[in-house]
Amino acid sequence: MSLAYEEGVEFDASGSVKVRVPAKINLHLGCGPLRPDGFHDLTTVYQAISLYDDLHVMRADDLTLTIEGEGAAALPVDEGNLAIRAVQALAAHTGHEPLARLHLTKHIPVAGGLAGGSADAAAALVACDALWGTGLSRDELAKIAADLGSDVPFLILGGTALGTGRGEQVNPVLAGGGWHWVVAVADGGLSTPEVYREIDRLRDLGIAPRPAGPPDQLLAALRQHDPAVLAAALVNDLQAAAISLRPQLRNTLRAGKDEGALAALVSGSGPTCLFLAESSEHASLLATRLTGRGVCRTVRLAHGPVPGARVFA
Ligand code: C5P
């Protein structure tokens, strides 16, 4: 692929662009009450981790999507897919024809609480911006991204960031590098709206845990760069709802703790579970032990933070 540069804008001269986009986890997910627009106010700290989807976008006379890899057979390839809606939104915003051939290679589990669908939308925005040479700023892309989904702006930014509003307003935070995670992927997904409905239900019944306060402790822990301190600060208000809908997640979380994880928590709306390790060696050991416990479909290693959606050669 040949990339050319014009007025500081990276655009494609060969008719083909490849973008790599990470999954996200939430180190702190504080969920407020249901808003009149059907969303919940969030205070969250996102981290992009090293599980990636790859999107290859080519010039074409129509708009098509093909998918291979993790969960591909279950995914729509029309407007039901957020990547297609992202291409259409970018086209509408820039006046460009919505023409591109998209090929997606998925490694991020589908409906896993890792924002795989949002990641693909972020990748499609960045890829078509380069393919068409529309040269939008990161802020303009983030605006289009926010209309597509609450997590999409973060997946363009990447790194570690504070998310407010419904999660779509993102600002980078100082986190240092090299946090090591073991990711336990469950069989089947959980519906994000259902998990939010369940937390509302548990709260109405008065049986939800007390909501998380501001993420001050978490932000301080990130700056300290001590995994044991971070472990004590991780919090996810949606965890109780995910466990209520999928009680076996309790076993997965317990198994990770038994095998020596510094902390265990549900990722976003679940059902993926995350385990914090002290080091990459500790993470490998933990992953092996967790695999042996048979409490999830598959176990993956990841580190964070990593950059957001990026063109790569
Ligand atoms: O923004 P996104 O499309 O990812 O949201 C999917 C669904 O998750 C929303 O329709 C809503 O039911 C729920 N949600 C929410 N509050 C948020 C984000 C998502 O209730 N802050």
Image: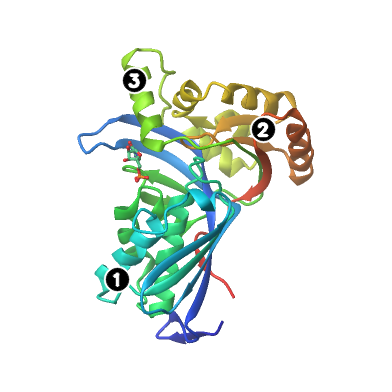
Circles 2 and 1 in contact, beta carbons < 8 Å: no
Residue at disc 2, secondary structure: helix
Mark 2 lies on residue: 228
Mark 1 lies on residue: 91
**CA distance for labels 2 and 1:** 46 Å
Mark 3 lies on residue: 201
Q: Residues within 10 Å of mark 1 (few under 14, many from 20)?
A: some
User: Of marks 3 and 2, which one's residue comes earlier in the chain?
Assistant: 3
Quarter holding residue 212: top left
Q: Amino acid at mark 3?
A: Arg
User: Of marks 2 and 1, which one's residue comes earlier in the chain?
Assistant: 1
Q: Nearer the viewer, residue 233 or 301?
A: 301
Q: Please give the name of the residue rendered at 33% of the width and 24% of the height, measured from the top-left corner.
A: 200
Q: Position of residue 84 (x, y in %)?
A: 37, 62
Q: Amino acid at mark 2?
A: Ala
Looking at the image, residue 170 lies above or below residue 293: below
Queried on whether the Cβ of the residue with tag 3 lies below 8 angstroms from ligand 1, the answer reads: no
